[in-house]
Image (tube, helix red, strand yellow):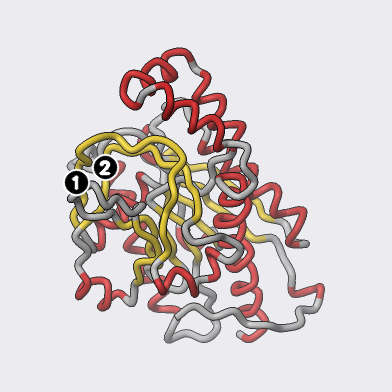
């Protein structure tokens, strides 16, 4: 479904790419926005191209970007229920932006001189896009999922460039009360979407495994987990006295110590942090420049 094109680009075809970061944290303290901005900045040093970004405070200030003004979009995680925006202006604007993004790319298919837009959705945004497209049941979990966990790739996920460089299972940071289960396979097929990853295998738990990553199109990708999370941010979060006490009360001291121990493992969240979102940015820039040269 997703293709990489190999080509020689003349230096003059390379130009600034504009990234819009949609902040869904509703002004709550977080590490996610720092991580996203650092990954964008770090890719400037490896792509040989400038990525400029602007931040849009979606929930607190009802801000959304104009589709035409940006090449790449990253929509963040955030606290609370994915339904709490119902009837509010910010959700209406967000869904209108999402609809505009989808139709813009569809219209580009009939216009060879236009370049498509690329978008990545994280955690809370994953739940929002799943609500928008109605691809599954968005519901509360039986208990909070928080920590560093293995996640399993589907056959489609094993072939997807976004996970190139990761093992199966790979490890990710999870922090959510909500989940998306019961995939509507007919709806996914209509969209041309594929489920790329599923929740960890729990043979002792008689519950459906949640969808953890979906490619909605060649340009639009979403993860239920936090691929941007890094050890420094997670350690800061875990060392907070109130959070440490809460985790130990819910999960036990052994589970807390396991979370801390896993942070420095090069094959766990360090590798995921260095792989998924950077792969998305690199592939988006490659595709954008291929389209530019061949327009």
Residue at point 46%, 40% (across, down): 148
**Depicted 209 relative to depicted 236: above or below:** below
Q: Quadrant of residue 12?
A: bottom right
**Which quadrant would residue 132 be assigned to in this image?**
bottom left
The location of residue 234, given as percent across then percent down, is 53, 32
Q: Which mark is residue 178?
A: 2
Q: What is the number of callouts on the image?
A: 2
CA gap between label 2 and label 1 equals: 6 Å
Which quadrant holds the N terminus?
A: bottom left
Left or right, 39 with reference to 131: right
Q: Position of residue 174 (x, y in %)?
A: 41, 41
| Residue for badge 1 | 139
* Residue at the extreme top of the image, as rendered: 241
Residue 231 quadrant = top right
Taking the image as shown, residue 149 lies to the left or right of residue 239, namely: left
Image spot of residue 251 (x, y percent): 34, 27
Residue that extends furthest to the front in the rendered view of this protein: 204
């Amino acid at each position: 479904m997703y293709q990489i094109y190999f080509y020689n680009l003349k230096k003059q075809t390379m130009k600034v790419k504009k990234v819009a970061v949609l902040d869904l944290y509703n002004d709550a303290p977080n590490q996610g926005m720092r991580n996203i901005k650092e990954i964008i900045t770090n890719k400037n040093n490896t792509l040989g191209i400038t990525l400029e970004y602007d931040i849009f405070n979606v929930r607190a200030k009802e801000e959304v970007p104009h589709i035409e003004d940006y090449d790449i979009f990253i929509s963040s995680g955030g606290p609370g229920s994915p339904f709490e925006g119902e009837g509010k202006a910010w959700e209406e604007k967000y869904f209108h932006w999402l609809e505009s993004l989808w139709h813009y790319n569809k219209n580009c298919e009939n216009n060879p001189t236009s370049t498509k837009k690329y978008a990545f959705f994280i955690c809370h945004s994953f739940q929002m896009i799943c609500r928008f497209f109605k691809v599954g049941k968005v519901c509360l979990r039986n208990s909070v999922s928080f920590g560093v966990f293995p996640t399993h790739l589907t056959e489609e996920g094993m072939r997807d460039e976004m996970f190139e460089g990761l093992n199966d299972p790979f490890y990710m940071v999870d922090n959510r009360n909500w989940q998306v289960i019961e995939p509507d396979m007919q709806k996914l097929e209509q969209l041309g979407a594929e489920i790329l990853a599923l929740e960890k295998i729990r043979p002792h738990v008689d519950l459906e495994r949640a969808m953890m990553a979906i490619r909605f199109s060649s340009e639009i990708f979403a993860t239920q987990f936090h691929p941007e999370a890094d050890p420094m941010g997670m350690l800061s979060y875990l060392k907070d006295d109130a959070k440490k006490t809460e985790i130990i009360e819910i999960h036990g001291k052994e589970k807390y110590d396991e979370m801390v121990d896993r942070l420095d493992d090069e094959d766990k969240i360090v590798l995921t942090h260095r792989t998924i979102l950077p792969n998305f940015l690199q592939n988006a820039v490659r595709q954008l420049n291929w389209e530019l040269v061949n327009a």
